[in-house]
Structures are given as structure tokens and as C-alpha cells.
Amino acid sequence: MSILPIFIPHAGCPHQCVFCNQKTISGQKTAAVAGAQAQIKRWLQWLRPSVDNEAAFYGGSFTGLDLELQKQLLALTDALLAQKIIGSVRLSTRPDYIDVERLALLQKHGVKLVELGVQSLDEKVLAAAERGHSAEAVYKAHNLLRQFGFQTGIQLMVGLPCQNEESVRATAKLVAALKPDVARVYPVLVIKDTPLARLYASGKYQPLSLEEAVEQSAFVYQALTTAGVNVIRIGLQPDEELCTPGNIVAGPFHPSMGELVKSRALRNKITQKLLKLIAQENLTIELHCPKKLESKLRGHKSENLCYWQQLLPQLNLKIVIEQNSAEEEIKVWPVANLLHP
């Protein structure tokens, strides 16, 4: 499956959230049909036609667009569907821009998945981020999408104004209970020319450190994946424009944020098992790890191994790499040390 991305930056948004500068994030400057056509033409040079492919409208709030513009943009993907270049369409929008009329239109044009920009289910956080909608709007939108048979996605953020770790954890649990099909997790970055950049400059906002962002995102990731939700993105795509010097004013940016978070989630999970076993004496603990998970187990610059050595210095830990294993998890095996009764 390949994604054909079509960026419509800040299109359809009734106002600007404090963290948002979609033109910088997406690298696109216009939402006009001509701009979408140019993007599609460029991507078709590399895309192999397949009904497994999906066109994705990114940026802004698609269902907030003028109805005629929605139809014109969807006509572009209708042509791709008819030629079997793609087999489905996805888009993102605001929870308060979901209703029966809008969803009926999407159904007619091959849209299969709708992602909701939720960010948080904490009312205080939503207000501080100037989202312009309540948590109740999220539940109503998600329920209506399910009634119409759409697959759903939910986008969350960590590090928003007025958001603490307790708030992040509460939102993660609530979203996990909704069981969307997919999710994205974005640590907040301070992007230039945003209200948040002005709050940061005045000292009224302090972004998360990289450590805090990884730890909080790891909790969200673990909560969602445990509930069967496919987390398809962690952290903003480190494209050329976003990474241009000066665009990121502050915040926990890392080009491999997803790997850091997944490795931390794995470390937290294994640590819980180790703590239960460590009370037993004369024990070697083996971590049987499929080769494909080795880098996540060790962590960035082997930080997971260093963490366990510092936390549990008495631990006799042995890593067993299983070269040909098809397993998707790491097994923790206690082994009695018979040489030291």
C-alpha cells in the first residue's frame, strides 16, 4: 500500500489553534484545486497503480471547506479511483465539522477513513489550545462516523498549554476506550509565527523536554496499542521546510521520535516484568528478542540497557537474539543459576 498525499494547509479551519502554522508543517502554500492537481501529477510519476493505494488529504479541516471546493477536490480523487490508481481516500477534519450531510458526501466519493484532530479530551486543555470545541463534540463525531461505516482515526498531542502528565494519561485511556482504527501522537513543538511562539517568547509557555515528551508519548502509545489501535505516526514528519533553521523555535523535536517512543514503551513494559522477578535470588533473566526488535530493545545508544543496569545493578541480564524468529514480542525468561545455590 502507498499513500498519495495531498496537502491543503489550514483549509477549512475556522481559526488558528495556538500551536498551528500549517503552511510550515505541510510545506504547501495553497489549498486551491490547481495546487492539489500539481501535487497529484508529481506523485503519479512514482506511484504504481493499485487498489491498495490510498489518497490522503492532509492539513486543515477538509469538511470545513466550502461545499463546492470539497466536491472539486474529491473529483480529483474520483478520477484516480476510476482508473484504479487508488482504491480509497482518507482525510482529516475537526470534530465539530462532522454531520450527516457532510458524511453523506464523503461516502459518495470513496472516502473510507476520517481522522479527527482531537489533541486532548481535557476541557481545560482544549480551551487553552483555542480548539473551539468541547470533548463532547469528539464523542458525537466519532459515534456518527461509526454509524456511517467509516474507519476512524484520532490525533493526539502531548505538551499542550495547561496539559500535565495526568491529563495526558486520562485522555489516552478515554481514546483507547473509543477504539479508533488508527491514531497519531504529536509532541507539541513551538513553530514560528504561531500564538504559541508568542506565549513562549513571553515566558507563559514552557515546552516539554525531550525526555518528558518521550515518556508521555510512550504511555499514550502503549495504552492505544494495547487496546488494538494502530498508531501510524509519532512526531511530525521531519521534512525539509519544517527542519529549515528557525522554523522550530523550541520543543522536543527529534527526527526519530517514533523509534524513541516505541523503544521507551518497550522498556517500560519489560521493566515491570523485571521488577517482579528480581526479588528471586540466584537468577539469570534472559530476554529472548527477535532480531527485528533488537534496536528497540537496546534503545537509542543502548540507553535501555544502561537504564536497567542502573535501576537493577544486581540483575544478571542476558540478551538472546533470535535471528529467524517471527515473533512480535520479547519474552522474559527466568533461569535458575545452579552454580550459586
Image (tube, rainbow, N blue to C red):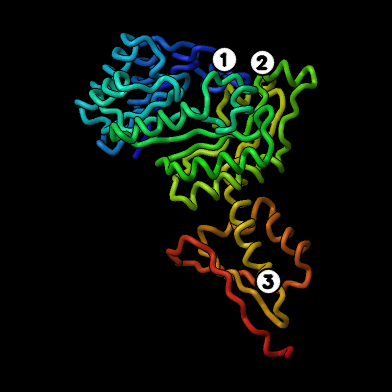
Is disc 2 placed on a helix, strand or loop? helix
Q: Point out the image quarter for the C terminus.
A: bottom right
Label 3, secondary structure: give it. strand
Q: Residue at x 59, y 42 (%)?
A: 170
The kind of residue tagged 1 is Gln
Q: Is residue 202 above or below residue 321?
A: above
- Alpha-carbon distance for marks 2 and 1? 8 Å
Along the viewing direction, whichever of 263 and 38 lies nearer the viewer: 263
Q: Residue at x 56, y 32 (%)?
A: 120
- Tell me the distance, in whole angstroms, between the alpha carbons under discs 2 and 3: 49 Å
Vertical arrangement, residue 232 with respect to residue 283, above or below: above
Q: Earlier in the sequence, mark 2 or mark 3?
A: 2
* Quarter where residue 46 is shown: top left
Asked whether the residues under the numbered discs 2 and 1 touch, taking CB atoms below 8 Å apart as contact, a structural biologist would say: yes
Instruction: Please give the label number shown on residue 317.
Output: 3
Q: Residues within 10 Å of mark 2 (few under 14, many from 20)?
A: some
Give the residue number, with chain letter if any, for mark 2: 195
Is the residue 23 above or below the residue 148 in the image? Answer: above
For label 3, the crowd category at 10 Å Cα-Cα, with few meaning under 14, some 14 to 19 and many 20 or more, is some
Residue matched to label 1: 16
